[in-house]
Structures are given as C-alpha cells and as structure tokens.
Amino acid sequence: MDISYQETQDRLASRIRAHKLFGNFDISDWIADYIGRRSPGSILDLGCGDGNHIDLYLRCVGEEGTVAGVDRDQALIERVRSRHPAAKNLALHVTSMDEKLPFDDGVFDLCMVTFAIYNARDAEFTLRELHRVTAEGGEVVMIGPTPNNVAELYEFNEKVTGRKADERTLRRTARTVQEFLPLALGVFGRVQAEVLHSVLTFPEPAEFLRYFCSTLLYEEIAEREGYSLDDLKAYCPPAGKMTVSKEMVAVVAAKSA
C-alpha cells in the first residue's frame, strides 16, 4: 500500500497556525529543550516542509554549524530558501525519503523527522538511510502521532460522512509507534520513546472547521465526496469551544559510538 502524501503549503500552514494559536503544548519548545541538552553541530531536517523548524535549528547550531533540509516538494523548499536567503550554512535538497539521501556517511549529529516519517514507502529503507548519515554517537528523533491522536476528528468525520477513516489514514497514524519504533530497535539498538500530550482548544466552531479542512482525513473523505462547508457546519454546535486531542510520540534512536 502506497501511503506517501504530497503536502500542500496552504493546508500545512493552516495546521501550524492552529497549533500556535490554540495548543496548550508547542512541539517547538520540546525540540528546543531537547537540542539544548545536546548542542549538535550538524542537523538534518528530513521532510522539512516549508521550514517550520529550520530557524530553530539554525539558532541551535550557530554560525559554525550546519543545517540541511530535505523535502520532495519544490515549492516548499523554495519557501524555506526565501525565508533564509542569507543563511550560508543551510543546504536545501528536493528529494524523497524513499530515495538514497544525498549525503555522505556519518555527517549529522542529529536527524529530525517531525510529522513526516509515516509517509515513507519503505520504513526499514528510510531508517537505514538515517542510520547511515548519522554520526557515531548521534541521534535520530522521529516525532509523529499515536493511534489516539485526533480521535475527535475521526468521530466528526464519521458523523458527517457516515464513513470511518480509511486504512491508509489509520496506518499513517499508527506507524510511528507500531512500525518505526520496533524497526528502529533493530537498526539502531538503543531507542527511547516519550509520549507528548497536547490539546487544541478552538474558541469557536469556525476555527475547528478551518483545522479539520486542512487535514488529510478531510481531503481523502469529505472533500473527495463533495461535502461543502455548510454541510460540515450542520454537525457543529452553533457556538462554544471545541477540542481536539493531539497525542504525539517522540522516538529517539541513538547510533552507538
């Protein structure tokens, strides 16, 4: 089953906005704290999208360090480039995590894959490529959803469409825990996992719908079947707060020195 996904810039930006405005937990804070305890000199951001965390990585490595961003979407990479035109220590590449990474062996102290790893076609291939480009003593951090993530969106989608999330969507949600975690144990040997709890509290149904309409769940079911915004509104309360749980897991795999 091919579960790869071509992200769109506007919908990615909409989800990032929601997390910044309505979340009780910012994953950027967790990443900054994690990196601050390690001080890596070189960071790879695999599946970097439009560069939501590139600025953070550049600050962490300083002028003497290096950051590389990889995404298969040319438009997203160009957006990263436009945001950091003067960053001489930033290298950007348009390629897929399903292909051999364009780096020598052992060049990164830290490889970050934030809400992207579950799109890999072949989990073991991607993990072995990450292992190859990670320096001895370095780490790979994969952050993704748990199977409990956005349960409220699945319930809402089923109320509107009468359909449960399809197998492709559910597999993406579960892959970090059920597939990449056990495979990483075999590839790296030393692996830790931390569950990260977050809740999005939308102040009104309109913001909830804005978020729902930026998700892959909406794209693959409600949008494809022609449901309008008015159709969706009919299943929301007229006013009041709406919440969505965003349970995540951070899987940290260490390459033995």
Image: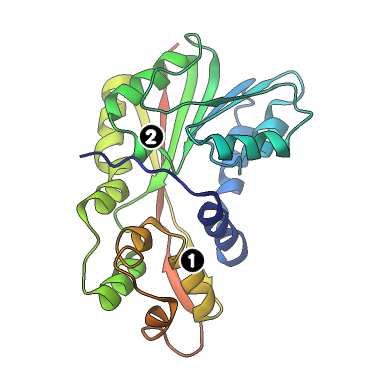
Q: Position of residue 158 (x, y in %)?
A: 26, 72
Q: Is residue 148 found left or right of 102 in the rendered image?
A: left
Q: Please give the residue where the numbered disc 2 appears in the rendered image.
A: 192
Q: Secondary structure at mark 1?
A: helix
Q: Quadrant of residue 234?
A: bottom left
Q: Quadrant of residue 42?
A: top right
Badge 2: residue crowd in 10 Å (few <14, some 14–19, many ≥20):
few
Front-most of residues 119 and 256 = 119
Badge 1: residue crowd in 10 Å (few <14, some 14–19, many ≥20):
many
Q: Please give the residue where the numbered disc 1 appears in the rendered image.
A: 211
> Tag on residue 162?
none
Image: 183 above or below 201? above
Q: Secondary structure at mark 2?
A: strand
Q: Position of residue 16 (x, y in %)?
A: 56, 55
Q: Is residue 149 visible?
A: no
Q: Position of residue 6 (x, y in %)?
A: 42, 43
Q: Quadrant of the N terminus?
A: top left
